[in-house]
Amino acid sequence: MRGGIWVLNIFAAIWFVVGVMGAGLPWAALVIPAAVSGALLARGSRAAADSRVPGAHVGRLVGIWSAIEGVAIFVAVTICQNIGARDAIVPVIAIIVGLHFLPLARGIPVPLYYATGLALIVQGLGAMLLPGDQRMALVGFTSAVILWVSSALLIRQVRAWSAG
């Protein structure tokens, strides 16, 4: 579970950077993801590891689905570039990342990841309805918030499990 908390926060910060770039904000805005992710990681580091999550297969499962995700992102970015749809790249990546959460939700199992995945998919699809120049900022900031909320809920679950 701690690994999941770390990954959620690292990628939330990366998505926030994408939002900053898309919105054309000053780099000083990067204090925000550093502070939010830092606070969640500090809180999560104190959370006990959940003994109910089997560990042996988790690394393999995450590795397999992350590799599939990476290949899918590479193919999707290449297609978007070749068809002249560069403004669709960031929403499409968010959709692929969301899809990647669905098998993890079942296989790890962390049911919260179903909601995380669906939220990323829905916001990525919704962003495709916006003008191209607005997509990168919206998807970056929204994806960051989705991952931060997921991290906070995961920390809360781990604390409840370790207390009970």
Image (cartoon, rainbow, N blue to C red):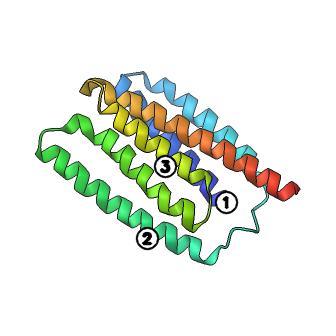
Q: Is residue 133 left or right of residue 161?
A: left
Q: How many marks?
A: 3
Q: Residue at 38% of width from left, 28% of height from top?
A: 137
Q: Is residue 108 left or right of residue 124?
A: right
Q: Residue at 47% of width from left, 69% of height from top?
A: 63
Label 3 Cα crowd, 10 Å radius (few <14 / some 14-19 / many 20+): many
Q: Earlier in the sequence, mark 3 or mark 1?
A: 1
Image quadrant containing the N terminus: bottom right
Q: Which residue is mark 2?
A: 64
Against 34, is 41 above or below? below
Q: Marks 2 and 1, how far apart in space?
A: 18 Å
Query: Horizontal and vertical percent for residue 24?
Result: 36, 22
Q: Secondary structure at mark 1?
A: loop
Mark 2 residue type: Ile
Q: In the rendered structure, find residue 117 and report the number of the disc placed on it.
A: 3
Q: Which residue is mark 1?
A: 1
Mark 1 residue type: Met
Snapshot quadrant of residue 86: top left
Q: Marks 2 and 3, how far apart in space?
A: 17 Å
Q: Marks 3 and 1, how far apart in space?
A: 17 Å
Asked whether 86 or 120 is in front, the reply is 120
Asked whether 13 or 71 is in front, the reply is 71
Q: Residue at 69% of width from left, 68% of height from top?
A: 53
Query: Horizontal and vertical percent for residue 34?
Result: 58, 36
Mark 3 residue type: Gly
Closer to the eye: label 3 or 1: 3
Q: Are marks 3 and 1 in contact (CB under 8 Å)?
A: no
Asked whether 2 or 149 is in front, the reply is 149
Label 2 Cα crowd, 10 Å radius (few <14 / some 14-19 / many 20+): few
Snapshot quadrant of residue 19: top left
